[in-house]
Amino acid sequence: SPHASPHASPHASPHTHASKAEARGLRQQQQARPITQPPPNRRQMSKTTRVVLLGPGLVGRAVCNLLKRSRATHEARHGLKFDVVSLIDSSGYVAASDRLKDEVISSALSWKEEGKKMKDFSTGGTAADMKAALSSVGLDANTCLVDCTGTDATTPFLVQAISNGASVVTANKKPVCCPYQEYEKLMAKPTKIGFESTVGAGTPAIHTLKHIIASGDSVTKIQGALSGTLGYLMTGLQEGKAYSDVVKEAHKLGFTEPDPRDDLGGMDVARKALILSRLWGSNLEITDVKVEPLFPEKFASLDIPDFMSSLTELDAEFSKVSKAGSNGHVLP
């Protein structure tokens, strides 16, 4: 783990509590107006945000579907409209000047789910790298750039978006773990970037830590199981399943990172630890976090398909976990 190691309870923060009379008044106000009914003049205050999505894969599809399902709620309760204007992958993009129609988004996401590239999308796909795609789409104060990729190549684009006054939301941990000098640029406007889902799957661990620190409490340690993927793996091993089978199953279900070595090598946990420690005030780098991989060094240079096919070589070694468990023991 990083040198920083914060332990604090969310209950440690002081809070101001309303009196019973105030609480009753608040409840009466809430009961008087349905939750989906906007306050007076809310619709005249409606604001449209252009959404540009990097990485229309498994996570990106979920984001688009969520925005679609929540459209009426966002506008009614918050006066906000989120219009997806572009879907971008490493090969190209599809875009619209105002917003992509729902049927085009659904078709494009299905296209990607079939393993096809966005540049070849039958309804308006354009070949371009991310830099050219973003330049074509434009990033301004009315734009939210959403990063659902698994690459650090998006980091300069997120920094540029922040500099342009755009908002950034990222589920991708790698840009938040960039060299500290770039990290400072990324966090130059804290209210313009959201990265809650990078740690704890939006539990919300990051919001809680920010709240504790902002309240003036002293954080001394953070402790937890930072990888659901490794928990899934170890549970499978304890049940007597083969290491290779559990890893392949987790990968197929989307539990692992696109490259499972990010999980098995400990880098996913290391990135989460680094993100938390930087929020806590450290200026650590990813190289300061020490990890021990669950695969031999020779596997590190393989491409993903070769890595996956080589996992059976490790089954015998990891079968010790289930044998130890059956004897009431654990391995160090």
Image (tube, rainbow, N blue to C red):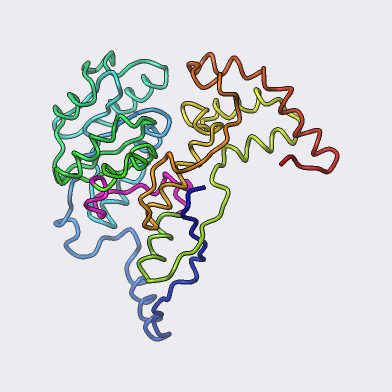
Look at the picture and state if 277 lies above or below 313: below
Side of 5 relative to 275 (left or right): right
Residue drawn 36% across the image and 47% down it: 195
Farthest residue, direction right: 327
Look at the picture and state if 156 lies above or below 70: above
Task: Please state which of residues 245 and 217 is positioned toward the viewer in this rendering.
Answer: 217
Look at the picture and state if 175 lies above or below 302: below
Side of 2 relative to 245 (left or right): left
Q: Residue 7: x percent and y percent?
A: 52, 62
Q: How many marks?
A: 0
* Residue interval drawn in magenta: 185-204
Residue drawn 37% across the image and 37% down it: 174
Question: Residue 37 falls in which quadrant of the image?
Answer: bottom left
Look at the picture and state if 131 lies above or below 166: above
Q: Residue 230: x percent and y percent?
A: 60, 38
Magenta segment includes 23? no
Task: Please state which of residues 293 and 126 is positioned toward the viewer in this rendering.
Answer: 293
Q: Quadrant of the C terminus?
A: top right
Residue drawn 17% across the image and 28% down it: 96
Residue drawn 28% across the image and 48% down it: 193
Task: Please state which of residues 3 and 7 is positioned toward the viewer in this rendering.
Answer: 3
Q: Residue 157: x percent and y percent?
A: 23, 34
Q: Residue 121: x percent and y percent?
A: 28, 16
Magenta segment includes 189? yes
